Image: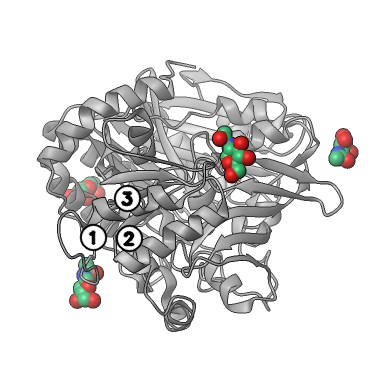
Amino acid sequence: MGIMVSRTASLLCLLLLSFVALARAEPHQTRNASNIKNDDATGFGSACALIGKAISNASALSYPLSVQYFSDIAHWASSSTELSACSVEPGTPQDVGSILRILGQTRTPFAVKGGGHSTILGFSSTSGVQISMNRFNSVTVDNATSTVAIGAGLLWDDVYRALDGTGLNVVGGRVPGVGVAGLTLGGGEPLSIQSIGIFWYNHGSEGYSWKTNQFGLAIDNVDSYEMVLPDGRIKVVRPEDEDLWFGLRGGFNNFGIVTKFVLKAHHQGNVWGGFVIFSSQQFDKINTAIVKFQQVQDKKASIIPTYNAFSGSPSLVLLMFYDGPGRPEGIFDDFLAIPNIQSTVRSGSFLEVFSIFPSTNTFGGTRAYFSSVPVLQYSSALLNVIVNETLFWGAKLAQLDLGTIASYDIEPFDAGLFTHSPASQPSAYPPDRSRALFPTNLYFGWTNPAFDGEVANALRESTRMVRNAAVADGQDVQTAAVYGNYALFGTPIEDVYRNNVPRLKEIRQRVDPENVMTLAGGFKF
Ligand SMILES: *[C@@H]1O[C@H](CO)[C@@H](O)[C@H](O)[C@H]1NC(C)=O
Ligand SMILES: *[C@@H]1O[C@H](CO)[C@@H](O)[C@H](O)[C@H]1NC(C)=O
Ligand SMILES: *[C@@H]1O[C@H](CO)[C@@H](O)[C@H](O)[C@H]1NC(C)=O
Ligand SMILES: *[C@@H]1O[C@H](CO)[C@@H](O)[C@H](O)[C@H]1NC(C)=O
């Protein structure tokens, strides 16, 4: 499938581009550092030195210009990367504890990076101390409890590779390149996919999975968390810890640093799926097929159609997945009958089919923002507006910069999507489980940091148009909760967590009275 650039090559690109981009871009995003105090400019450096002395030999500290440093600060979107004072890869929860204590005592800003897929500057990047979780990289199956323990530094790719051949699987990311931690702490799953000629771009979603129709969000399939609390103590969190259990399920990094996710294992047999690319001449036929697909009752079937305009040139990538050994009769026939440019569908192991989905790669240079419009359904009228937005903004962005992309993911799920968690176990996200919301990912990509502001405004404008179209459709979504993993920077926490905000604030205050985790960016309670 097209051309894949290795992570090493991306890293080299990043080395060059990051200095250029970072030197030029004064981030206009809101990194709320108003509560951060630091005595002097060298304060970050002294925290680095203290950390270097405190950690065991299972962990490693690095400084700018080392290979480890650049890999530690690298993000999927170059617009999410910052040059930190130093980076540290903790190798044990005890060392995470030592690091947090030093950061809290010295009031040093920091960031925690799992997979590095965030599209918000400052959420997993910092000018202070960058923590990279990549040494938490083990996958351990426990047959007795039917669970899988997964290190917080892994990508879903690593997890599926480790589980291949075991007959077991977990509810995780839908496309290659997405990290375990961000997806699982945010709720479900982030994702978007774009074809750009022979290259592919995409990104992860949070809690939503190919298996979500059957089993719910990723957060609904957690058995326990191993985490380091803001005061440095290690804790295993289970449903009995009602407050943390509620907060960790969708609440990102407000309560400490998760080092291990123990997920429920599900039986996994062979599957069918792949992606198909269509030209824009087929948009009408595809729209009709998408509307009809939403009547499908079989929870093993799932699709993600993505409208893309790369440098103004439109196309559609359709991902299809069926959690059974062959193509089921009827369900995908309408899509398969439409003439396509390329098709990769096949039967195989979960890993085989997952691996042919377009992989996450921005070649270290592309800037990216996501946004989200939660909807109740994709009607023909709504899809027409989304097609127009793709063409309109695709053309606009193409006038602005080279190598731009305007991309809209349609994410229909089963109506019972949010019913897979006991009523006694509410979660930070989604704040309302009484009805299904489909998260719809909007993604704009570009290369020149000078256009950051313009692209953000364009994405805001398009988000408003799509939401208005859903409302005009009769959908009551004006104040529907936005999926945190897709949210545009500057999205107020109320838009993501709604009525849960007061409880989340109260828990945060109790768990972190010294305000250690507020030294890290993110949606802060
Ligand atoms: C940053 O924090 C200050 C003080 O808490 C608040 O007034 C301001 O609105 C915040 N800015 C953003 C963008 O959240
Ligand atoms: C790390 O330290 C432990 C004990 O502190 C020691 O047993 C081990 O050999 C060390 N490992 C390396 C690679 O130096
Ligand atoms: C777990 O179960 C699988 C499949 O039944 C088996 O192949 C594997 O050896 C088991 N592992 C352990 C540690 O018992
Ligand atoms: C297409 O989208 C643009 C930008 O949102 C809007 O100005 C225009 O009116 C739309 N055209 C149609 C036919 O809806």
Q: Is mark 2 within 8 Å of ligand 1?
A: no
Horizontal side, residue 148 vs residue 184: left or right: right
Residue 300: where, in percent of width, then height?
71, 45
Kindly check if marks 2 and 1 are in contact, taking CB atoms under 8 A apart as contact.
Answer: yes
In space, the residues marked 2 and 1 are separated at their CA atoms by 7 Å
Residue with the mark numbered 2: 521
| Element type where label 3 sits in the image | helix
Cα distance in 3D space between marks 1 and 3? 21 Å
Q: Which quadrant holds the C terminus?
A: bottom left
Q: Is residue 416 visible?
A: yes
Decide which of 108, 214 is in the foreground and name it: 108
What amino acid is at disc 3? Answer: Cys
Of badges 1 and 3, nearer the viewer stands 3
Give the camera-side residue of 54 and 133.
54
Dot 1 or dot 3, earlier in sequence: 1
Label 1 residue near ligand 1, CB within 8 Å: no
Q: Report crowding for label 1: few under 14, some 14 to 19, many 20 or more residues within 10 A (C-alpha).
A: some
* Residue on which the image places disc 1: 31
Helix, strand, or loop for circle 1?
loop
Residue 191 relative to residue 165: left or right: left
Mark identifier at residue 48: 3
Q: Residue at x 48, y 39 (%)?
A: 305
Which of pointers 2 and 1 lies earlier in the amino acid sequence?
Answer: 1
